[in-house]
Image (spheres, rainbow, N blue to C red):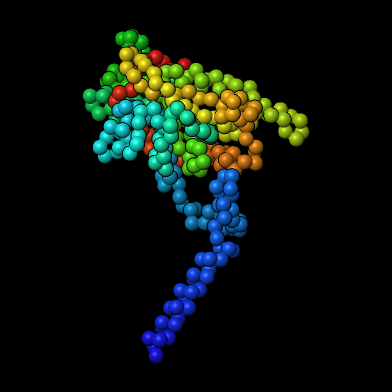
Amino acid sequence: MLEQEYYNEDKYDYEYRKELNMSDELAIKRDEETGLVVMDIPSEFEGIGSEQLGADDRTVPWFKILQGGSPEIKSANSRVEGAQPGMFYNSATGDLFSGDEGVEITICTTERKFVEYTPKDKGNDFVGKHEPGSPVVREAEAHSKLNDIWPIERPNKNRIVDTRYLYVLVGDCLEPAVMAISSSKLKNFKNSYKEKMSIYHRCRVKNSNGDKVKPPLCMIRFIVKSFDDVGKGEDFSNLKMFFAVDDNINKSIRSFDDPIVKLGIQVAEDFNNSNIQVDYAEERVDSDEVIDVKVFE
């Protein structure tokens, strides 16, 4: 009798759960355009359980252009199937993107740092990052100018690499990633990057009051593409940046109400408030990168 009661109860529970799982009311619905889950969550439950999560609990993945020496290609432990030089790789999703076709990115915010690495014969390891004009950078610049060395290095032979970090959303992925643009390899990128940023800084939109205002950077859609380049007699993959639609900024502006824009603003605020932790040591200068000319001045 007890066994029969248990069986009936278990069967009822199974049928009940099966009915719930098939219910349209409980099905997860997504916005067709953005892929975002559509769900009414009461404000008092927003983010509950994450109150104690800080910067040390979050890390930002990398979005990178692959070189021949990149671990995703060369390393037996880190090799990614199908990876080739010139492709773009998002470590958050494991996705590879064709360099020729390019990939759309949303730039949430940027920063400039001078990144210190040990010499190649001592591991090429990440040491730290320094502010422009800091004592370490001034020391390296003076030492390198005196000895005609480029890229600049400290007296202990550690290299200092001028680097732009772009905090981006890649394609349809809603997980932010960081893109490191260093002076060690992407010598031609400065032209398209500076050109696009100059156009953006002049860009204005009219608000409902008729005032002209600069839109948030994350409202602009960009595309990055790679191409084969040569520096100091060595082949490597370089990249260029374009506005996403006809390389025209006015055609490439999103609506302020676009969920991607809202997310981009949040990423920028999180970064500015130090709520985003980047594992800079994870991203090394690849062993075959070409050291050629100064990129960012």
Q: Is residue 104 above or below residue 140?
A: below
* Residue drawn at point x = 31 percent, y = 33 percent: 73
| In front of the other: 214 or 83 | 83
Q: Picture coordinates of residue 153 (x, y %)?
A: 32, 18
- Which of the 4 quarters of the picture holds residue 160? top left
Q: Can residue 84 be seen in the rendering of this structure?
A: yes
Q: Can residue 271 be seen in the rendering of this structure?
A: no
| In front of the other: 65 or 114 | 65
Q: Residue furthest left?
A: 121
Q: Is residue 183 above or below residue 265?
A: above
* Residue drawn at point x = 47 percent, y = 19 percent: 190
| In front of the other: 101 or 169 | 101
- Count up the numbered dots: 0
Locate residue 149 relative to residue 105 in the image: left or right.
left
Q: Is residue 95 above or below residue 203?
A: below
Q: Picture coordinates of residue 40 (x, y %)?
A: 61, 57
Q: Residue furthest right?
A: 209
| In front of the other: 219 or 163 | 219
* Residue drawn at point x = 72 percent, y = 33 percent: 207
- Which of the 4 quarters of the picture holds residue 68? top left
Q: Is residue 115 above or below residue 191?
A: below
* Residue drawn at point x = 59 percent, y = 31 percent: 220
Q: Picture coordinates of residue 219 (x, y %)?
A: 60, 34
Which quadrant of the rendered structure holds the N terminus?
bottom left
Locate residue 205 relative to residue 2 in the image: left or right.
right
Q: Picture coordinates of residue 215 (x, y %)?
A: 64, 31
- Which of the 4 quarters of the picture holds residue 145? top left
